[in-house]
Image: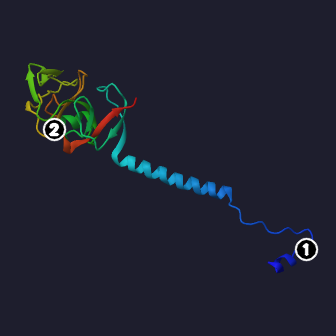
Amino acid sequence: MAQAASNLQIGDRPRASWRPNKRLWGALGLFIAGGCVLNAISDWRDTHALLINASESLPNWAFVIHKTARPQRGQYVFFVPPAGPLVIRHFGAKKQMFGKIVYGMPGDTVVHRGAEVLVNGRVVSRMKPLTRMGETLVAGPTGIIPADCYYVGTPHKDGFDSRYAAIGYACSKKIVGVGRPIL
C-alpha cells in the first residue's frame, strides 16, 4: 500500500473502488424479468388458447379457451366436429373448432317432440328439415347422454349442433376446451 501511494504524482487521484454499472444491472434485470414473462406465457399457452368466432350462431366473437377444464351445463364448449359430408360441404375439409353451449350433461335424457328437442323435459332447440342450401337434415341422437359426452347447441335458429345427426354429441375425445367470452 505504501508503494502504491508513493507512485502517485501531483494531480493524480487514487483509482476509485469498483462501482456497479447501473445500465448493466438494469439490462440484466430486464433480461431476467423477460425470461420469467416468456416462461409464464408458455405455461399459459399450454393450457389456454384464444379464439375468434366467425360464426353467427354465438353472440360473442372472442373467447379464451381453457383446455383442461371440464364442461358444465351452460358453459361454452369448443370441439372438433365429425368430418361427415355435410360438415365438409359447409365448413371445408380442414378441421376447425365449433363453439356451442352445453345444454345436456352425461346421464341427461334427450327427447324429440316433433321439431322440438328437449333435454330433461326442457326445450333447448327446434330442428329444421333442411339446411339453408336445401339439403336434408337428419335428427340427432335421443335417449340418455353417454358418459363423457354432452348435448351442445346454440339459441340460433340455423345452429348446426347436437340437434342434428351430422354433429351428434360432443364427446371428450373431440373437446378442445371450455370457453369464456371476452368480447
Q: Residue at x 34, y 46 (%)?
A: 47
Is 88 left or right of 33, judged from the image as shown? left
Closest to the observer: 40 or 163? 40
**Pointer 2 local density, CA inside 10 Å: few below 14, some 14–19, many at least 20:** many
User: x, y (%) of residue 168?
Assistant: 15, 34
Q: Residue at x 43, y 48 (%)?
A: 41
Quarter of the image with the N terminus is bottom right
Outermost residue on the right side: it is 10
User: x, y (%) of residue 143?
Assistant: 6, 31
Quarter of the image with the C terminus is top left
Quarter of the figure with residue 95: top left
Residue type indicated by callout 1: Gln
**Pointer 1 local density, CA inside 10 Å: few below 14, some 14–19, many at least 20:** few
Outermost residue on the front side: it is 2
Query: Viewer-nearest of labels 2 and 1?
Result: 1
Residue type indicated by callout 2: Cys
User: Mark 1 — residue?
Assistant: 9
- Real-space Cα distance between discs 2 and 1? 89 Å
User: Mark 2 — residue?
Assistant: 149
Is 55 left or right of 153, judged from the image as shown? right
Is 155 left or right of 165, judged from the image as shown? right
Outermost residue on the left side: it is 143
User: x, y (%) of residue 102?
Assistant: 22, 31
State the mark number for residue 87: none
